[in-house]
Image (cartoon, rainbow, N blue to C red):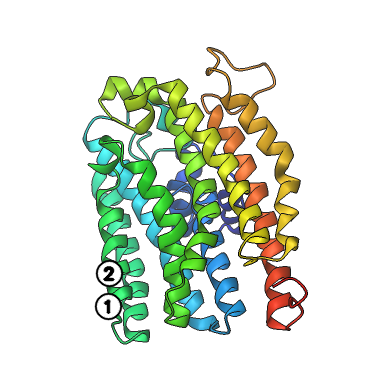
Amino acid sequence: MINFKMWKTALTTIPNVSQEEWTGLDVVSRWLVMTRSAVTTVTVFSCIVAGLLAWRAGGFHFLPWLIVTIGLFIAHGTNNILNDYTDFARGVDTDSYFRTLYGPHPLVHGFHDKKTQLVYFVISGILAMAAGVYALFYTNFDPIVLNLFVIGALTLLFYTWPLKHIALGEIAIFLIWGPIMIAGVYYVLTLDWSWSVVLASIPVGLGVVSINLAKHIDKMEEDRKKRVTTLPVLIGQTAARMVDIVALLATYGLIVYLVFWPRYFTPVMLIVFLAGKWLFYSVGALSKPRPAEPPKEWTAWPIWFAGFTFMHNRNFILLFMLGLIVDTILHVFHLAGWWG
């Protein structure tokens, strides 16, 4: 039976499920759980930002936006499926490794075998590729779209290995979920490459990479033992924490710049500062070494830094989109002349 309740749960949290529960789930619920869809929704957020900016520019078209958004969401999930398969096959993901402690890992927990994991990967990959092919036909095989398609495919295939193992995973995350995805979807819709859109996409990319970097700090000792050279493993915990703090602060600094210097945004975008409480919590946590044990009230261990940055980004991106909706309406209906 289709378990719509699990769909909702898997899209908002990372649920822990038993073997018995897994057996009773429908195929979509299994896919949502194994791909950690509560996290992959950041892809949908990036696509919404791109769609709003395209609408603001007079180039929004719903059907191509919807197809590309669904395709990118599936592509993100496909990457997570391959990530789990690759790390399991290489002996990185084990029953005591960080990845298996904060969410179900179908291979480690014995829910299914490697062949089944590959079947999920292939089917997901075909669906994601179909959306990419649609975008190519929709834009008459525009060379920029073709290049973005290739970049996306290569990142999906090679993020887990070797990019994550040579301290390039974090920069790839920033580029994909910021400039490449947002400016890329914007370009598919408008056929206009806009450096202003690239600049406006950077706060979103910084928000996403702040979570990824925080997670890699959380598990850097396990990664060092497994010889997975993420950026925190390469530069050390202190430097990595400082980099994450800079990323978080730069997110807000860039929005202030876009509001007051080129006036690309109206001041309504300053609504993102309502996420300041979670920014304060995140910076406060990152300013100190990771504790050896969690506080009694902390239920997400071994996630520590990533817990703060995830909650910050969830609040920030929702406020960013709310502000962008109002900002877009002001521009579309020619009500922003008082500022721009």
Characterize the local packing of mark 2: few (<14), some (14-19) or many (20 or more) Cα atoms within 10 angstroms: few
Provide residue 188's location: percent of width, then percent of height.
42, 77
Q: Is residue 2 visible?
A: no
| Residue 38 appears in the picture as rendered | yes
Lateral position of residue 325 relative to residue 313, left or right:
right
Residue at x 46%, y 21% (from the top left corner) = 238
Amino acid found under the numbered disc labelled 2: Asn
Residue displayed at 33% across by 74% down:
145
In the foreground, 28 or 319: 319
**Residue at mark 2 to residue at mark 1: CA–CA distance:** 6 Å
Q: Secondary structure at mark 1?
A: helix
Q: What amino acid type is highlighted by mark number 1?
A: Pro
Question: Mark 2 and 1 residues: CB-CB less than 8 Å, in contact?
Answer: yes
Residue under pointer 1: 143
Q: Which mark is residue 255?
A: none
Q: Which residue corresponds to the image point at 72% horizontal and 55% vertical from the top-left?
A: 270
User: Which percent across, then down, holds residue 240?
Assistant: 44, 28
At which x and y percent is residue 262? 61, 65
Q: Which residue is mark 2?
A: 147
Residue 258, located in which quarter of the rendered image?
A: bottom right
Q: Of residues 259 and 325, which is closer to you in this image? A: 259
